[in-house]
Amino acid sequence: DSIRFANQLIDALKRKDKKAFDEIFEEVKDPAAVLNTLPRGRRFACIHHACWFKESSLVDRMIEAKADPCLKTADGMTAAQCAATRVKLQGVILEDKTGLASKMQLRIDQRHRQEFMRHASTRCRRLSESADEIQDSRWTRRAFISVRKLDVDQFATYYKVGEFLGEGGFGVVHSAHIAGTRICRAIKFIPKNSVTAKFH
């Protein structure tokens, strides 16, 4: 139906038959789908024809019905370029004397800004959601601190203790490598007499 109505509206526009256009348009249930359809074999969609013939009132009506000002012709022209083109019709030169081309370009720029802002907003939301997921699932204390119960002999076998890194309120910190690997860890040594009963 969209293609059929689009062809009928385009034919009416080419004939400059506004009455036929109005009658057909009244029957359309989804104006946006029809106006934004470029039928196969056609160079122009409805909005391009309206701009080509400098029909400002029809262009405004189409925009109100959600026609896409960014829609391009089969050969890549924008609606603004159609409006800016001088057309010779039956010996009469049609020129853009109402600033239609400028208005169409403004609408195109506005649509591009809206699309950019929508894309940026979606991207920011996805990044925010990803950050929340990372914070919830990965960057937790457990990801950095692990408990391994080893006695003194097992510890000496499992870790190769390296240089002194620092000192805190509960003990000292050294670097260490897991024996036989290049995996590096930071290990805090806490004297037993500094640990309160609730930690035993």
Image (spheres, helix red, strand yellow):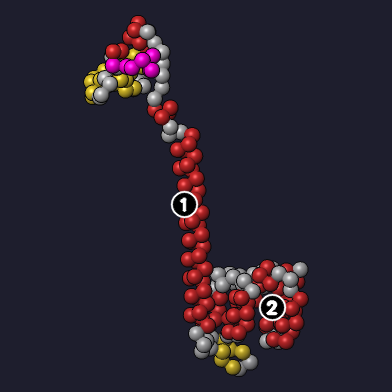
Name the side, left or right, on which 6 lies relative to 153.
right
> Is residue 109 shown above or below 172?
below
> Is residue 63 shown above or below 87?
above
Q: Residue at x 49, y 70 (%)?
A: 110
**Residue 195 belongs to magenta span:** yes
State the extent of the magenta-drawn residues as a range.
194-200
189 or 182: which is nearer to us?
189
What is the three-letter code of the residue carrying label 2?
Ile
Q: Where is mark 2, residue-wise?
A: 10
Q: Residue at x 41, y 22 (%)?
A: 146
- Packing grade of label 1 (10 A; few <14, some 14-19, many >=20) is few
Q: Quadrant of residue 16?
A: bottom right
Q: Quadrant of residue 196?
A: top left
Label annotation for residue 179: none
Q: Position of residue 67 (x, y in %)?
A: 62, 72
Q: Where is mark 1, residue-wise?
A: 124
- Name which of mark 2 and mark 1 comes first in the sequence: 2
Q: Secondary structure at mark 2?
A: helix
68 or 92: which is nearer to us?
68
185 or 75: which is nearer to us?
185
Q: Position of residue 147 (x, y in %)?
A: 41, 19
- Packing grade of label 2 (10 A; few <14, some 14-19, many >=20) is many
